[in-house]
Image (cartoon, coloured by chain):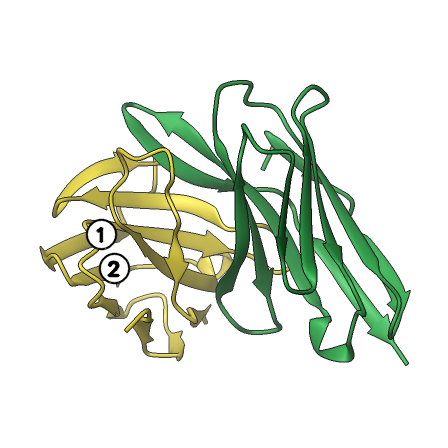
Chain colours: A green, B yellow
Amino acid sequence: GEDVEQSLFLSVREGDSSVINCTYTDSSSTYLYWYKQEPGAGLQLLTYIFSNMDMKQDQRLTVLLNKKDKHLSLRIADTQTGDSAIYFCAETIPSGGSYIPTFGRGTSLIVHP
Amino acid sequence: DTEVTQTPKHLVMGMTNKKSLKCEQHMGHRAMYWYKQKAKKPPELMFVYSYEKLSINESVPSRFSPECPNSSLLNLHLHALQPEDSALYLCASSQETGRLNTEAFFGQGTRLTVV
């Protein structure tokens, strides 16, 4: 998790937008991912973006990438209580000819009514 | 079918026991992974299999022994574990590891408690 940094907590009111931020260190072309983990469950791939893109939108989710600053964000519009979970930013790190998903520490999103 | 299935969901074992965790996928993926996740921490890579061969071992203690019997199955054999090995063990798969676009699909995990 040292290569990918995230803030640990975010609390929002239901209906508001949530913005979860991430910084990464690998400067080569890469794919960047957002995963969601609900309590006691595995990781669900939400969306991904290639490093030559600035933005990707998928329904309520918007991913913004600032390649110069190595900064990635996930915006969730109209946040619902069901969005409460831990959100992990991940990037593929080259390792001996393989590309391995490597995760940030995760941001706990708490949505309150 | 985009599922990765892990069994069992929960496992309690003593330090002298031998047990196995199982993982299965039918997406035709040729890369499979074991990750270990402690509470409030990110998943940490343990092993990677590529085309049924072990390609990465992240200096995991020998009390964890992975096995890939075929391209759909991945096992993790456990022997003489310690209480600090208690964690959520996650299996994942992806098309292959040689692609920059390595979308990994995860199972629900096995919650392991060592007593």
Please give left or right for residue B33 compared with residue B86 in the image.
Answer: left
- Mark 1: secondary structure: strand
Indicate the amino acid at tag 2.
Answer: Leu
* A9, above or below A40, in the image: above
Residue positioned 38% across, 26% down in the render: A94
Residue positioned 18% across, 41% down in the render: B54
To which residue does mark 1 refer? B65
- Mark 2: secondary structure: strand
* B92, above or below A41, in the image: above
To which residue does mark 2 refer? B76
Indicate the amino acid at tag 1.
Answer: Ser
Residue B62, position as x, y percentages in the image: 26, 45
Residue A111, position as x, y percentages in the image: 83, 72
Please give left or right for residue A21 compared with residue A67 in the image.
Answer: right
Q: Which chain carries label 2?
A: B
Q: Which chain carries label 1?
A: B
Q: Name which quarter of the figure residue B39 lies in.
A: bottom right
Residue B1 versus residue A99: which sits nearer the camera? B1
Residue B52 versus residue A16: which sits nearer the camera? A16
| Quadrant that contains the N terminus of chain A | top right
| Quadrant that contains the C terminus of chain A | bottom right
Residue A52 versus residue B108: which sits nearer the camera? A52
Q: Are marks 2 and 1 in contact (CB under 8 Å)?
A: yes
Residue A112 versus residue B46: which sits nearer the camera? A112
Same-subunit check for callouts 2 and 1: yes
Residue positioned 28% across, 52% down in the render: B64
Q: Residues within 10 Å of mark 2 (few under 14, many from 20)?
A: many
